[in-house]
Image (tube, helix red, strand yellow):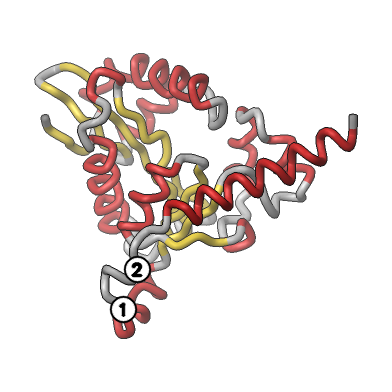
């Protein structure tokens, strides 16, 4: 298995990447359902994507998006082909794209929004912290990208303050400061139960509002 920075020689994989992202979103019931092959190829040509290959078989993918004049960076579209899941590949891809992002955009804040506990855990281990949406980019283009998600109405109803997704942020400046007072790893362990409770609270809150409206 190799995980490499994608380029235009990998354009032939764009269609299967888009299809895999779409199918995964359908199974989860949340998330952005579709990216076009042209969009994926553009990321490859700019060196803003990584691809995992087993020989010549597509195994996984993730790409970089930049916002607010490169002040914010998101590692988006993380996907592993079903044939290669449950072997830790998502974490490996995330590590590679994260380090690539830090190298290419060293001063940018790296963020993401997700409902997936597995992704939250990976992000946490990389140094991301849960944040409110107000701490993320205010770039309208980013938030318009949420329109493909079935929960978009929740985001608009709360005036972009909250959704079923959890916002997570890696701030390089804060990370430098926190290293001076870093806690032992045993204390800083990812609390999966806490995130599960947070997700459950959000779901209960929004579903109650839906019933009240009806």
Camera-nearest residue between 61 and 208: 208
Where is residue 69 drawn, in percent x and y? 50, 56
Q: Residues under labels 1 and 2: Cα distance?
A: 9 Å
Camera-nearest residue between 153 and 186: 186
Camera-nearest residue between 117 and 58: 117
- Camera-side mark, 1 or 2: 2
**How many dots with numbers?**
2
Q: Which residue is mark 1?
A: 182
Which quadrant holds the C terminus?
A: top right
Q: Is residue 11 above or below residue 68?
A: above
Q: Residues within 10 Å of mark 1 (few under 14, many from 20)?
A: few
Q: Quadrant of residue 8?
A: top left
Identify which residue is drawn at 41% across, 75% down: 174
Position of 51 compared to 37: left or right? left
Where is residue 193 drawn, in percent x and y? 47, 52
Helix, strand or loop status at disc 2: loop
Q: Which residue is mark 2?
A: 188
Identify which residue is drawn at 38% across, 42% down: 118
């Amino acid at each position: 298995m190799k995980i490499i920075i994608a380029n235009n020689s990998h354009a032939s994989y764009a269609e299967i990447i888009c299809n895999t992202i779409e199918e995964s979103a359908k199974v989860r019931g949340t998330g952005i359902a579709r990216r076009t092959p042209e969009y994926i190829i553009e990321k490859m040509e700019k060196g803003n994507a990584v691809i995992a290959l087993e020989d010549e078989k597509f195994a996984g993918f993730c790409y970089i998006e930049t916002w607010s004049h490169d002040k914010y960076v998101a590692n988006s579209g993380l996907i592993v082909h079903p044939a290669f899941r449950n072997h830790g590949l998502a974490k490996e891809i995330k590590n590679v794209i994260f380090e690539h992002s830090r190298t290419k955009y060293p001063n940018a804040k790296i963020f993401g929004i997700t409902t997936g506990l597995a992704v939250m855990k990976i992000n946490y281990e990389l140094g991301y912290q849960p944040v409110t949406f107000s701490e993320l980019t205010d770039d309208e283009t980013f938030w318009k990208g949420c329109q493909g998600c079935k929960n978009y109405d929740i985001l608009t109803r709360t005036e972009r303050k909250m959704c079923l997704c959890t916002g997570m942020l890696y701030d390089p400046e804060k990370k430098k400061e926190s290293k001076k007072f870093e806690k032992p790893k045993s204390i800083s362990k990812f609390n999966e139960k806490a995130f599960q409770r947070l997700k459950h609270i959000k779901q209960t809150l929004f579903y109650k509002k839906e019933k009240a409206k009806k």
